[in-house]
Amino acid sequence: MKTVHARIEGLVQGVWYRGWTRKTAMELGLAGWVRNRTDGSVEALFHGPEAAVENMVALCRSGPPAARVAAVHLRPATAEEAPQDGSFEQLGTV
């Protein structure tokens, strides 16, 4: 199992990036969350099988069709940061 925190920069708000992330992560069987940040970026936490997490990170580099991703910054995270019920949540802006 692998857990990563991602911060995605570029044109990623107002283009359905959070909804796309939640849908895609759920299809891949990942737990975690996604939210907008007031600086215009999107951040997410992905937890699950290593291959699925790596696939999700690769997909985040392009995102939904209207997004224009400039950068994806990753850092390790812990499984305890993910929802313990295995869900993938869309959280409010911070």
Image (spheres, rainbow, N blue to C red):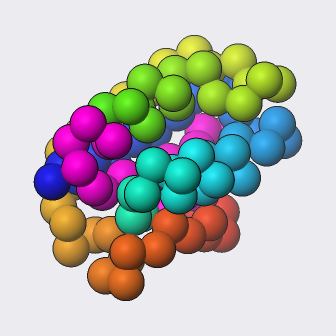
- Residue 37 visible, this orientation: no
Magenta part of the chain: 33-53
Quadrant of res 85: bottom left
Q: Quadrant of the N terminus?
A: bottom left
Q: Is residue 14 above or below residue 92?
A: above
**Whole-percent x and y of residue 24?**
58, 46
Quadrant of res 11: top right
Q: Is residue 82 above or below residue 4?
A: below
Q: Is residue 15 magenta?
A: no
Q: How many marks?
A: 0
**Whole-percent x and y of residue 73?**
37, 29
Q: Nearer the viewer, residue 51 or 73?
A: 51
- Residue 23 visible, this orientation: yes
Q: Is residue 16 above or below residue 57?
A: below
Q: Nearer the viewer, residue 42 or 51?
A: 51
Left or right: where 61 falls relative to 19: left
Q: Nearer the viewer, residue 59 or 17?
A: 59
Residue plotted at (72% across, 52% down): 19
Residue plotted at (54% across, 52% down): 27
Left or right: where 67 falls relative to 5: right
Residue plotted at (70% across, 18% down): 68
Left or right: where 33 falls relative to 39: left
Question: Residue placed farthest to the bottom in the image?
Answer: 85
Q: Quadrant of the C terminus?
A: bottom right
Residue plotted at (51% across, 27% down): 59
**Whole-percent x and y of residue 71?**
49, 19
